[in-house]
Image (cartoon, helix red, strand yellow):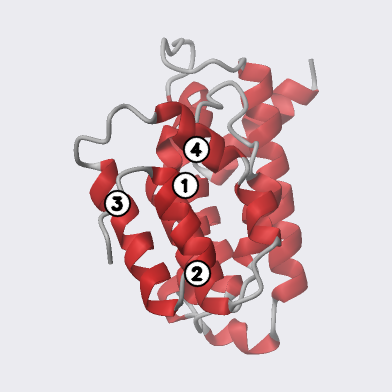
Amino acid sequence: METLKTFRELFNAILTADNNQSRLAARGVRKLLYSSHGGQYKDIASIIENAPKEYAKINEDFRQENFVMAISVMYFLHNKENQPDFLFPWLFQLLQHENGNIRQAAVRMIGHELGPLTYHIRFPGEKSDFHKFSLGQAGSILFGLFTNLNNLAANLWKPEYRKCKYIDSLPTGPYKSIQLILSHMEDDCGTNKFLEYQGRQNGK
């Protein structure tokens, strides 16, 4: 495979090349990201922002996986710090995918946003200099995420899950992926603490 020097070239290969070349291009995204990539940050942000539209055009299973994995590698460089939930509708879709690698990538991308979104709960009264959204916006996004995940979990729940005491013992699938995110939320701020905070906000 010829050396591809830009992210646009790599994603073009992911979307159009054969199975092996598409896979190599997906791996090339990580290599380029952590090398001297010439400051292609605008291209990175554009590729991430348009990911749902491009993904919708993909028919092949292998290409869907390569595309999502490549997006997840560079996701932290999106330029939507003031709108951290901009890809959540797409990520909710990916959480329900039958491919475990795609679900895992979605879990990682949502997890990336939880630290900033829960900052005001973990450190009450402190203001972060790095986050560009308001406390009210963060609370609203968190509550929407919590509600949507629980609704998805309820729809996916099966009676055999009763015997699973821990998340790790759940069978691999969308339900387990959703529970991993909910567990992450609880680790970051505590479900009870989060619900208490949301109740105070709604009571204002």
Q: CA distance from mark 1 to mark 3?
A: 19 Å
| Near-viewer residue (18 or 75) | 18
Residue 65: which numbered mark, if any? 2
Q: CA distance from mark 3 to mark 2?
A: 15 Å
**Which amino acid, by three-letter code, is at mark 3?**
Arg
Q: CA distance from mark 4 to mark 2?
A: 22 Å
Q: Answer whether labels 1 and 4 touch (C-beta < 8 Å).
A: yes
Question: In the figure, 149 relative to 64: above or below?
Answer: above
Q: CA distance from mark 3 to mark 4?
A: 20 Å
| Near-viewer residue (30 or 176) | 30
Label whose residue precedes the other's in the sequence (4 or 2): 2
Q: Answer whether labels 1 and 3 touch (C-beta < 8 Å).
A: no
Label 2 Cα neighbours within 10 Å, binned few <14 / some 14-19 / many ≥20: many
Question: In the figure, 139 relative to 100: above or below?
Answer: above
For residue 169, what is the image quadrant?
bottom left
Label whose residue precedes the other's in the sequence (1 or 3): 3
For residue 74, what is the image quadrant?
top left
Residue at left offset 46%, top offset 66%? 66
Judge whether residue 7 can be spotted in this image.
yes
Q: Which residue is mark 3?
A: 30
Foreground label between 1 and 2 = 2
Q: Which residue is mark 1?
A: 111
Question: In the figure, 70 relative to 39: above or below?
Answer: below
Label whose residue precedes the other's in the sequence (3 or 2): 3
Foreground label between 1 and 3 = 3
Q: CA distance from mark 1 to mark 2?
A: 19 Å
Residue at left offset 41%, top offset 75%? 168
| Near-viewer residue (169 or 48) | 48
Residue 113: which numbered mark, if any? 4
